Amino acid sequence: MTEGANPFESLQSQIDEAATHLEVGDDVIERLKHPERVLETNLTVELDDGSLERFKAFRSQFNGDRGPYKGGIRYHPQVSRDEVKALSGWMVYKCATAGIPYGGGKGGIIIDPDEYSEAELERVTRAFATELRPMIGEDRDIPAPDVNTGQREMNWIKDTYETLENTTEPGVITGKNIASGGSEGRVEATGRSTVIAAREAFDHLDKDLEGATVAVQGYGNAGWIAAKLIDRMGATVVAVSDSSGGIYNGSGLDPVAAKDHKNETGSVVGYEESEEELTNDEVLTLDVDLLIPAALENAIDAGLAEDVRADVISEAANGPLTPEADAILEGKDVFVIPDILANAGGVTVSYFEWVQNRQRFYWTEQRVNEELEEIIVDAFEALVATLEEYDLENPRTAAYVVAIRRVADSFEEAGTFP
Ligand code: NAD
């Protein structure tokens, strides 16, 4: 992971690059490069030993032109105001790329969750939910999980909100477990869209996915599901990694067994079928057909990009390439499926969850997966059509061209008020 590259500046440069291809005024583009508002709050929480600790937390509402703000909540020691702003902006363009009726938001708490008990994490989460209460709601802003948060945290936020508001409103948050109003298929959705997009890209490039070699960096929710599903499609997962390091087997790893090993020991490292241990950088620069970065931002910087040997990259993580790395990979003809399309499955099934919550009518997993497939395939087709129409080389630029056009259209239809 590269320190230093500012993700908010990366977002703004991606918008600037796409804007050069669009007839949208500079004044409108300027609006689309900055969040509408950012909450910065200090949570004071009692620890198990009775002492108090302060936690800094953020919620950025980037743009609501196309619908309520939507985006996850991250717990990580490196959460920062700029990171949250960038992630909230990516959500705007992700929802627009997928064509789902949301704006973008994101939240985070500066915390290493491994250092706290479950009871402490519950108090931290409920304290944050209390701060968020005036700005969230199923028609205002709908949080979801992100790194180091999941169903447990979503259920605490829903319960806090509903208790304080004296209502039942499961659509205030997505990523809940099924008993609390979650959707079938949500847990697998991000990994699923990452591999659907990869399959479409291989098809577009006339490459065979059957037998293709795959490396996956990051083995959490997004990464491990992507590994499992791409293996089922006939590809061979030769390397995976997590924050402790990577493992390699040229004949293919069993993604499920590697995950079991991680569940038992805390890491994929040490998994018995691994032939060789690799560093994270070695995993990212393996000579594979498909690379899936599924950890955090800035995994590949300019220096590492020179050594990347994959033909296709499907970005399960948000912002895994710095803009410099993106340019280098474009020069090397690597087909990069941008995060705002590849990992859009997460927010798409969150959208389905919200629709089901509002209708109080729940779908089968098969229906969820079929509707997801249609949305991701349509979004990929729109990207390819835009690449051709605008004579672009970089799929990310094409995705932003589609997305910015859609957001700008909504804004221009509504006009400014006051
Ligand atoms: P997670 O916490 O479940 O998993 C993160 C994984 O990354 C862990 O295995 C961790 O060990 C690993 N990791 C951390 N630092 C690493 C490093 N330097 N090298 C290698 N591995 C490292 O998180 P997640 O939900 O899978 O999210 C991963 C990425 O996907 C994030 O960028 C997130 O924003 C993005 N994303 C997730 C979802 C979702 O629905 N979960 C949706 C859209 C985007």
Image: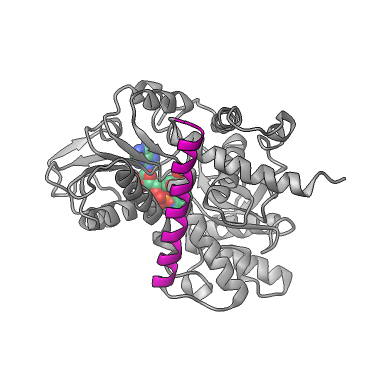
Q: Is residue 377 magenta?
A: yes
Q: Residue at x 66, y 75 (%)?
A: 168
Q: Position of residue 158 (x, y in %)?
A: 60, 66
Nearer to the camera, 347 or 170? 347
Nearer to the camera, 166 or 293? 293
- Horizontal placement of 408 versus 289: left or right? right
Quadrant occupied by the C terminus: top right
- Horizontal placement of 158 versus 339: left or right? right
Q: Is residue 161 magenta?
A: no
Q: Quadrant of residue 278?
A: top left
Q: Position of residue 381 (x, y in %)?
A: 44, 48
Q: How many marks?
A: 0
- Looking at the image, which residue sits at the far right? 418
**Which residues lie in the magenta part?**
366-392
Magenta stretch secondary structure, dominant: helix
- Horizontal placement of 222 versus 392: left or right? left
The image shows residue 410, relative to residue 368, as above or below, that is above
Nearer to the camera, 237 or 180? 237
Residue 166 is at least partly visible in this image: yes
The image shows residue 353, relative to residue 250, as above or below, that is below
Residue 148 is at least partly visible in this image: no
- Horizontal placement of 15 versus 194: left or right? right
Q: Quadrant of residue 19?
A: top right
The image shows residue 229, relative to residue 160, as above or below, that is above
